[in-house]
Amino acid sequence: MPNAAFRDSLRLLGSRRFGTFWFASLLANIGTWAQQVAQPWLMLSLGASPFLLGLDAFALGAPVLLLILVGGALADHGDRRRIIAVFQSIQMLCPVLLLVLIVTGIVQPWIVIVLSLVVGITDALSMPSFQSIVPSIVEREQIPAGIALNTTQFNLSRILGPAVAGVLMASVGLAGAFAVSAASYLPFILVALWILPRGAPTPAGTGGLDRHKLKAGVREVLHEPGLRGALLTVFLTASLSAPLITFAPVLVKDVFQGGASQFSTALGAFGVGGLIGATGLLAVNPEHDRRPLSTWFAAGYGLIVILAALNPWTWGLPALMVLAGISMTISNASANAMLQSSAPARIRGQTVSLFMFSMRGGMALGSLVTGVTVHLLGVQEALLLNGVIALLAQLALGRVWLKVPLRR
């Protein structure tokens, strides 16, 4: 029963290891989302064009295209404690440096873009390690609930992070948001070091990190039509629909003549929608086929992008962002749960890396291409084009994917 599934999910949140990890991740993501509000507004305040805004988002996500599979192999064969500690510590230095540059008044758009590239590289190499924490601390049948709960905290942070950023930017300025971002790394690093076992998870006789095994793991995941469909759904969502988030500050500033508070409200509204979507997923039976959820909500996200491009009212943007948050969260989390539940434990890191490749790599490419079309056509016209293509592509893919027999 759905109600029983919901109660089981909440009991998982009350467990010591998962509950501690959940709370530390929430704090870390609040800091991340505070910076996600402050950084594009910082770029715009420095006179950056929409293309540079898209380039900044591309720099953050592009390393995934080249390095995420290496990160997945590291997660499967390396010491996850060391991977997280090293790369997240390097990443923490980036908001610290931005904070210093803002205070001294010497920050420039190109510096912000370079630091985004550093964050993107460290993310690509460490993300599969901490994305695979949930499957390693819960039972296999609890993986969908664990992912849904993790998605819940991520979207709760999408509400709290922009709210914190809005207050800080109005009171102490942009520097306050970057200070919160830098401080938020510490709890997550410490909890990850506590919760993960020492040493590499490499099974005996595997020989550690190997290029041929990396390729074999990728082929094994992509050989399954159902998993391919999940990854392609996520990629289309990320590349065509997610640019609504990247270029929301341009919509607010150029179309509605709003300021940072309106942008933080819009981003917070997206988080509200994501929280609603993630909470709804907690009530879904773990045995339920999640492909229809992923497909139809992905198509719905494309429709919402179309409506956002055509929307003439200031109040309409936050309302549409709530719907966008619901749609993206249910679609992506359903695809992720299907991938991680179906993947053998020996290649779970590679499976996570392919999911992140589809999501983060798609966002990077989508941000860069949309940045060009925004420059050439205007922000509303570019988003309208994205939304139409996304809606048609998701419907076409769904017709094929939903007919594939589901393997359990």
Image (cartoon, rainbow, N blue to C red):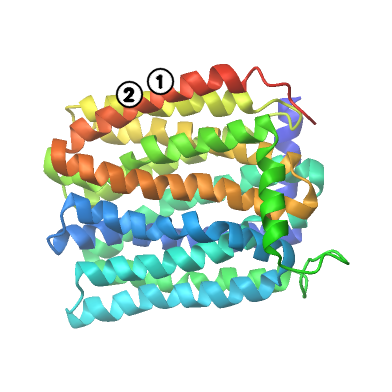
30 or 64, nearer to the observer:
64
Q: Pointer 1 and pointer 2: residues touching (CB < 8 Å)?
A: yes
Specify whether residue 62 is in view: yes
User: Please, what is the three-letter code of the amino acid marked with disc 1?
Assistant: Leu
Q: Give left or right: position of 145 versus 161.
A: right
Q: Is mark 1 on a helix, strand or loop?
A: helix
Q: Mark 2 points at which residue?
A: 388
Q: How far apart are marks 1 and 2 (CA)?
A: 6 Å
Q: Is residue 265 above or below residue 328?
A: below
What amino acid is at disc 2?
A: Val
**The image quarter in which residue 167 lies:** bottom left
**Observer-nearest residue: 266 or 113?**
113
Query: How far from the left and from the top, in percent, is residue 62?
Result: 41, 56
Can residue 172 be seen here? The reply is no
Residue behind mark 1: 392
Residue 343 occupies quadrant: top right
The residue positioned 59% from the left and 31% from the top of the image is 229
Residue 124 in the image: state x and y as whole percent: 52, 61
